[in-house]
Amino acid sequence: MCISSCTSQTHADLLRYLTPNSYDGFTPPNPRPSKMKMKKMQRFFGLPPSGELTKETLAVMKKPRCGLSDVEHVGETVRWKKRKISYRSEIINKPVHSYCWSQAQINGEAWQLWSNVTPLKFHKRDRREADIVISFYYGDHKDGSPFDGKGGILAHAFAPGHGIGGDVHFDANESWSFNSTGINLFAVAIHEFGHALGLPHSPDPGAIMYPPYNFDPGYEPQLSFQDVKDIQKLYGELSWIQPPPKTPAKCDPDLSFDAVTELQQEVLFFKDRFMWRKHPQFDETRITLISSLWPDTVPPNLDAVYQNVWENVILFFKGNKYWVLRQLNLEEGFPRNLSTLGFPSRIKSVDAALHFRNDRYTVFFTGDECWRYLRSYSSLALFPVFMLSWIPTPLDAAVFYNGFTYLYSGPYMHEYSLSTGRLYRVLRNNYFLPCSNF
């Protein structure tokens, strides 16, 4: 949905987002952000590139983020010319909320992740001069990039070099934590240390260098395949490292999906903690994080998803639990156990779901069984029905799209017409994304 009128405050926020190093009192030459820059930002985050200030664009802008620009990256790549790099931490005057982790431990662990995949060695200094100084500041701290208080910009870093080069600044107003309620200092430190080593932001939503910080429930901060590739391009490789996790690629011929659903005009394809969004008005289908649309509520590695248009809700299934969201908000009392829908105790999860909007019922697939779920104001009932011979098993996902039913199993999707009862095509899963290789 497009926001047609932009308040002066929203416009100022947008300007600060697209030009994060600007500050109060400074007026850039072109004070109105161009549509081109807006589209560039939307493409970066896998959003439909409308050039308009949509709800999804605003949601991205409001996420806690790094102070470096997502849109602009100019100049030559800068790196340290040595392999032994020293750092010094200035004392934080605000405690990190953790039972067993101190700021020094967090910094050491964050540097170790980068050291594990490069020939770089990091040495902590207590009082002497250091290549990199790590500090916590409030508001305007005289480096041209003031902090904005709680939320918004959490930290920023400077490219390798003399003086302030390589230094890392954290906003002292934030509720910093490690693996607890608050802003995860460990995840932010890994990201900012990447900048201090010369890395720009990455458009890969699975990368630690992706600009909005990832605080998904249960997420353990780590370097992705892309992070490792980028840092090794600057500093070289080690003889052997454990392969880092890869972000799913839509051109992978063996790509499978966890779930697929229609949502308003779009089709969403879910994989691990990511999703692709296919919009009828745009050719591009870029990958993004599930949390970019549903922050802190929807778990990764889903089993099934479907939209109930009559009740204006979307349901997510994982294991023996399910979540119901209206708009972007979790309904009260969720997640709930599958048994509350009427499933017998032997059913521990569902494989896929199809919602028949005209008939107002849903079919769940579990192993070699189908269950028809009817919801009324007075009762919930489940009716087991036999699995049709033309339905592939095991089933990964199912969706209605463009008048056909698509059933996903492994790397293939089966295109059916329920009106004729015919199977029309068997296609690769990435047929709709699309991928130029197929």
Image: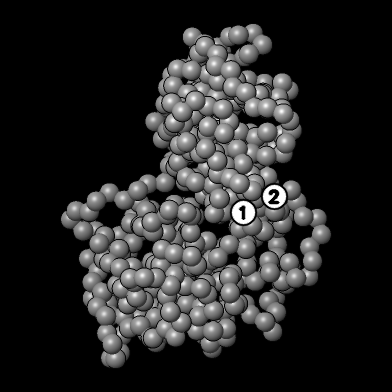
Question: Callout 2, which amino acid?
Answer: Ser
Q: Which mark is residue 438?
A: none
Q: Which mark is residue 42?
A: 1
Instruction: State which quadrant residue 236 falls in.
Output: bottom left
Q: Residue at x 36, y 57 (%)?
A: 222
Q: Residue at x 66, y 24 (%)?
A: 374
Q: Which residue occupies the foreground of this view, 4 or 436?
A: 4
> Are circles 2 and 1 on residues that touch, CB within 8 Å?
yes
Numbered disc total: 2
Instruction: Compute the Cα span from label 2 to label 1.
Output: 8 Å
Q: Which residue occupies the foreground of this view, 203 or 398?
A: 398
Residue lying farthest to the left in this orientation: 239
Q: Of helix, strand and loop, which one carries label 2?
A: loop
Q: Residue 77, relative to residue 238: is it above or below?
A: below
**How far across and down, in percent of the image, does residue 331 sit?**
64, 46
**How far across and down, in percent of the image, does residue 421 sit?**
60, 8
Instruction: State which quadrant residue 417 falls in.
Output: top right
Q: Which mark is residue 50?
A: 2
Q: Which residue occupies the foreground of this view, 370 or 150?
A: 370
**How far across and down, in percent of the image, does residue 101 sit?**
34, 71
Question: Callout 1, which amino acid?
Answer: Gln
Residue 177 in sight: yes
Q: Residue 81, relative to residue 57: is it above or below?
A: below
Residue 236 in sight: no
Q: Residue at x 55, y 13 (%)?
A: 385
- Left-right relation of 362 to 213: right
Choose the circle earlier in sequence order: 2 or 1: 1
Badge 1, how many Cα within 10 Å: few under 14, some, many 20+?
A: many
- Left-right relation of 314 to 338: right
Q: Of helix, strand and loop, which one carries label 1?
A: helix
Badge 2, how many Cα within 10 Å: few under 14, some, many 20+?
A: some
Q: Residue at x 68, y 76 (%)?
A: 28
